[in-house]
């Protein structure tokens, strides 16, 4: 439960805790069903799915998602950032890389929100080079209004066509609001007043 008074800066709740949890369970059921064949423990080279969460935003979603999946899942994390200057400004690189070898593994990339699509596109290229058996994408929110790179998402929690800044359930604005149990829009004045 959350109080009727929203925290400063929060405009409107888009998805409540109940809605998020329900959707996470539905996604988990879909994922479980799809992977049943490929990770069957009757297979001689059976290995759990590697679920890679993209830090920091996906940490809550990943934790809830994999606990709702009853087939074996091995979690790992990456963190990417873009260079602000130098020879390749804007280019993404790993700030933290996954520790798990992805060779011949079924990889599920877990993202809190897809915006431009640049992060997922970068990771797909990187993980392909590492010889993953398969790569699938699971995003809690597919925010389409600023998309630059087309990415084929295999599992989507919520579609969002608006252009508001979204926070909560892992998503932040200047490191605030990640611990909200719901996902909400941030008021434009909160962004203006901090810049
Ligand atoms: C956000 C979000 C996604 C990424 C999506 O992360 O959590 O990982 O941006 O953006 P894209 O589709 O435009 O590439 P951010 O870099 O803000 O870091 P954070 O997860 O630590 O908040």
Image (cartoon, helix red, strand yellow):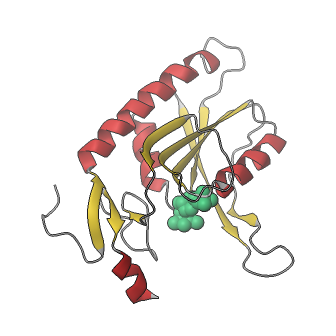
Instruction: Report whether 84 appears left or right of 37.
Output: right
Q: Report whether residue 51 is seen.
A: yes
Give the residue at x 64% y 38%: 152
Vertically, is 127 above or below 11? above
Which quadrant: the N terminus?
bottom left
Query: For residue 171, which quarter of the picture?
Result: bottom left
Image coordinates for residue 142, horizontal then vertical, percent: 50, 48
In this view of the protein, which residue sits in the foreground, 13 or 55?
Answer: 13
In this view of the protein, which residue sits in the foreground, 188 or 138?
Answer: 188
Q: Report whether residue 69 is seen.
A: no
Give the residue at x 39% y 44%: 64
Give the residue at x 53% y 29%: 72
Taking the image in four quarters, ligand 1 sits in the one at bottom right
How many discs appear? 0
Vertically, is 173 above or below 51? below
| Residue furthest out toward the right | 87
In this view of the protein, which residue sits in the foreground, 124 or 114?
Answer: 114
Query: For residue 48, which quarter of the picture?
Result: top right
Instruction: Report whether 168 appears left or right of 8.
Output: right
Give the residue at x 61% y 55%: 147
Vertically, is 23 above or below 160? above
Image coordinates for residue 52, horizontal then vertical, percent: 60, 46
Image coordinates for residue 184, horizontal then vertical, percent: 32, 61
Instruction: Report whether 173 appears left or right of 104.
Output: left
């Amino acid at each position: 439960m959350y109080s009727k008074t929203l925290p400063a800066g929060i405009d409107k709740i888009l998805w409540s805790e109940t809605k998020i949890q329900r959707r996470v369970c539905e996604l988990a059921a879909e994922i479980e069903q799809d992977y049943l064949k490929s990770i069957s423990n009757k297979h001689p080279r059976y290995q759990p799915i590697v679920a890679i969460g993209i830090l920091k935003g996906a940490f809550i979603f990943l934790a809830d998602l994999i606990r709702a999946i009853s087939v074996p899942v091995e979690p790992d994390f990456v963190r990417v950032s873009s260079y602000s200057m130098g020879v390749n400004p804007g280019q993404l690189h790993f700030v933290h890389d996954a520790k798990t070898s992805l060779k011949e593994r079924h990889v599920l990339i877990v993202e809190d929100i897809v915006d431009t699509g640049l992060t997922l596109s970068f990771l797909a290229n990187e993980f392909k080079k590492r010889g993953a058996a398969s790569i699938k994408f699971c995003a809690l929110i597919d925010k389409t209004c600023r998309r630059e790179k087309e990415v084929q998402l295999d599992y989507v929690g919520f579609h969002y066509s608006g252009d508001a800044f979204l926070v909560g359930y892992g998503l932040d604005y200047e490191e605030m609001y990640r611990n909200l149990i719901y996902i909400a829009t941030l008021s434009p004045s909160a962004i203006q007043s901090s810049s």
